[in-house]
Amino acid sequence: MQFEQHFDYIVIGAGTAGCVLAARLSEDPAHSVCLIEAGGSEQHPYIRIPAAVGAAIMSPKFGWGLTTVPQQHVNGRQIPLPRGKVIGGSGSINGMAYYRGPARDYDDWAAQGNPGWSYAELLPYFLRSEHNPEYAGSPYHATGGPMGVSFPRSRNRLCEAFNASIAALGYEECKDFNVPEPHGYGYRQGTIWNGRRVSTASAYLRPAMQRPNLEVLTETLTRRILLDGKRAVGVEIQTGDRVRSIGARKEVVLSAGAYHSPHVLLHSGIGDERDLQSWGIEPLHHLPAVGRNLHDHPSAFVVMDMEDSTSYGLSWKALPRDFVNLWQYVLTKSGPLSSNLFETNAYIKTQPGLDRPDMQVVFQPARRNIRPFPIPLGHGFVVAVVCLYPKSRGRVRLSGPDPLAAPLIDLALLSEEADLESLIKGLTLARKIISHNAFAKYRARERAPGSAVTDDQALADYIKETLVTVHHPGSTCRMGPAGEQTVVDHELKVHGLEGLRVADASIYPRVVGGNTNASVVAIAEKAADMILGKPAPMPMPRDAGGVRQSSTAAEASPSLSYPEATT
């Protein structure tokens, strides 16, 4: 094969995982690293300002424009699937929630034949990445890491009503959602520092880009991974109309996300050989699980409108306040524009006997627009419920032999009746929360589902008409011992191949019960250690017997210890 350039390591995808990997692998000047990103720069106000999250996620400038195929069990609807096509990937357009998930999720991973992936073994990687002085002294938090984590500098008064309402229903307050067994309601932290979004692009990659041994290729599509026999030796890339190949002396690391990592593997001839042949692609390595086991968190919501202007939103009534808030942000990086709008939520168990919460209740103190618009217009609030452990499983497939064509994505939403039943329970709970007298003074009225929707069948019909996902896809390159349902082993090496690993949300054995960004950062941190042959940190048990000192994260990564760089 003819290669235009050679690097020691090639990382495909400058998303949440890819930015971490490129930064960590390039820390040693002896290693040359190439990071390939299909999108462009993330230096834009929509991305940097937390409250502009709606504009960031809806902008075609920063996304792939993906949708599902028509969903059979959701009235044939095609569901939008926002994914970041920009440096930082989906971490540059997400809701910035910082949540790791229950310890039992990771212990389950380890129990399924993945040594090294238990909660105790992953906790040091969470700590390594974190700069979180608001929990100083906690064994579950650290300072000195690259990613600034904090509570938003604004709290809408409607959040107090939500917290009071759910407390009245008997749920406990949770002071820290990143302990081993998080449950209850409360304010939550985000990847926000000094009033600005923190992504792995700003925290890891931008400071590392000054290194001469790191080359970042933007607006460059990865067409396929190149194999020499059973070894990955390079990648074929395309910038504009120009197609070329670059070589990897040591490894290729695929970090293109739950939809595009299997997409790249399939175009490389790695997947189910019968499917590859049907698409006119030469099968080079039979691996039937590529693209399978796809799932995401489905969500339904109750939408409330009100005349009261307490909520975030644009209106003539709120215009003087909004003008003051704008200058407050410009001058001090505080106020509502420094918030990600999702300031409080709850993790609850919908039935006795569960060993972890199975439902997330998310409160948004802003109106949901009737028509797509990136900023809330008018006033109101939304209570969304999220099924954390869906049983439905879908698949990512190719739409044809052209690498530039979008994949076919079938989440098979609500194909398992239990997922629909979970959301019906959730909407019933959401209405109970809203009906509490803490909300009475706001005189809100229910726009959706609406007063006419009362019984379970009507709620089911409403869910099928409005259901969305909360953009936490995973498991399409599932980790586990070699078999029909896995793609990578516990070291993230693709089964049966050399020189090729996958490191992103696609390797989840099962998606964690909540927001996924923090766990992807930890996956990438651990992957970098394994690639470089570094010993794993000492495991930290759930009781975290030895408190992690605030200097630990900095000592683990002195070259990335600069929370100021995330501002």
Image (cartoon, rainbow, N blue to C red):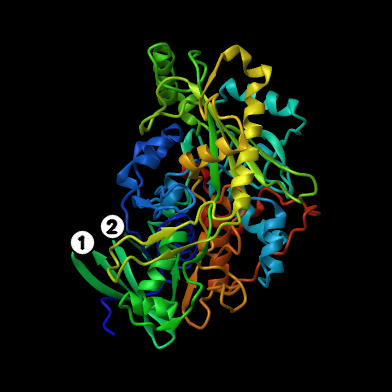
Look at 40% across and 62% down and name the residue there.
260
Look at 43% across and 63% down and name the residue there.
396
Image location (x, y in percent) of residue 84: 39, 50
* Rendered position, 322 above or below 33: above
Q: Residue furthest bottom?
A: 229
Q: In this view, does 424 lie to the left or right of 39?
A: right
Is label 1 in contact with label 2 (beta carbons under 8 Å)?
yes
**Quadrant in which the N terminus appears:** bottom left
Distance, label 1 to label 2, CA atoms, is: 8 Å
Image location (x, y in percent) of residue 203: 48, 49
Badge 1 density bin: few <14, some 14–19, many ≥20, Cα 10 Å: few
Tag 2 secondary structure = loop
Q: Which of 476 and 85 is in front in this view?
A: 476
Q: In this view, does 121 lie to the left or right of 496?
A: right
Look at 38% across and 56% down and name the residue there.
209
Tag 1 secondary structure = loop
The residue under label 2 is: 219
Q: Quadrant of residue 190?
A: top right
